[in-house]
Image (cartoon, helix red, strand yellow):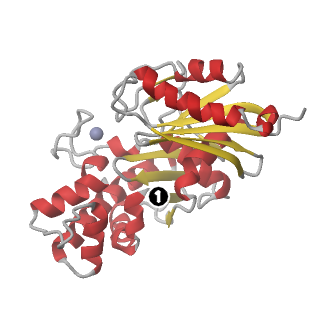
Amino acid sequence: MDTDLVAALDIGGTKIAGALVDGDGTLLVRAQRPTPAREGAEAVMGAVDEVLGELTASPLWARAGSAGIGSAGPVDAGAGTVSPVNVPGWRGFPLVERVQKTIGGLPVALVGDGVAMTAAEHWLGAARGYDNALCLVVSTGVGGGLVLGGSLHPGPSGNAGHIGHISVDLDGDPCPCGARGCVERIASGPNIARRALADGWLPGPDGDATAAAVAAAARAGDPVATASYERAAQALAAGIAATATLVEIDIAVIGGGVAGAGDVLFTPLRRSLADYATLSFVRGLTVAPAVMGTDAGLVGAAAAAIALR
Ligand SMILES: [Zn+2]
């Protein structure tokens, strides 16, 4: 039988999603479980096996020729292991070997979730047609990935493009990664909310103190909320400009929950980018919102699996 499908897995701190995907990126069969992130390694693997069990039970499974995994990082693509920050039970966990065992030895590709999102946006989304792109996921953390010379550039370990931990504030706040002033420490959703609260922003009567609530306040004209988004935009712009100067990219695609703030983020981001991306070869850089939505991880994992064929 023709193996024209691939299996895709998207592993995050809150959910584990799986799908059988065709060569056009259409998700034909889906399965999902919550991630038992606070439990041990085998409990988390059990949830992965349940998702895979639903896929292998499908009559379409016989058409699957390879599998791709996009996982919260860090990942080590060479070793086939993952150590997601938000899944403490998995440290150096041999995910590729375990998945391969469950699916009868098919070849398995592993990439970080930022790289997976990038693969999806390049294949079918906002970076389609661009040979050189940086894609960012700005949500609880800040991740990313690179397309260089027309191809996905995961790097030797599968983490290349991890813009969240580029330092843009040399003497800035300590970051959980051990460095200071990282893009993520300034631009992630929790940090946007934290800064707004510290500077005197007060949540509304519903008590919602998330970055989305800060965005709503900024839209309504609150100056502290606006300033927190401007600071996040400045950090992202500095990181994007550094990346563009280093490897020459034509487009920066921004997704994740924080990108849902729309103009509250994108207007100051484009303004700040003009301040930092000043040389002739980076000045034309385009900034665009991501379009692949919550399926980006699965579609990107499928792209990684297709690349194995
Ligand atoms: Zn950091």
Does 164 appear above or below 107? below
Residue drawn at the location 23% of the way across and 72% of the way down: 226
Residue drawn at the location 35% of the way across and 71% of the way down: 271
Beta carbon at label 1 within 8 Å of ligand 1: no
Is residue 308 visible to us here? no
Quarter of image, ligand 1: top left
Residue 292 shown left or right of residue 139 in the figure: right
Percent of width and height locating residue 80: 54, 21
Percent of width and height locating residue 8: 64, 39
The residue wearing badge 1 is 255
Q: Residue furthest bottom?
A: 220
Does 49 appear above or below 35? above
Q: Residue 88, located in which quarter of the rendered image?
A: top left
Q: Nearer the viewer, residue 172 or 218?
A: 218
Residue 305 shown left or right of residue 179 in the figure: right
**Quarter in which the N terminus is drawn:** top right
Does 209 appear above or below 180? below
User: Which element is circle 1 on?
Assistant: strand
Residue 65 shown left or right of residue 109 in the figure: right
**Quarter in which the C terminus is drawn:** top right
Residue drawn at the location 36% of the way across and 66% of the way down: 269
Does 276 appear above or below 224? above
Q: Nearer the viewer, residue 112 or 203?
A: 203
Neighbours of disc 1 within 10 Å: few (<14), some (14-19), many (20+): many
Percent of width and height locating residue 193: 22, 59
Q: Nearer the viewer, residue 159 or 220?
A: 220
Is residue 90 visible to us here? yes
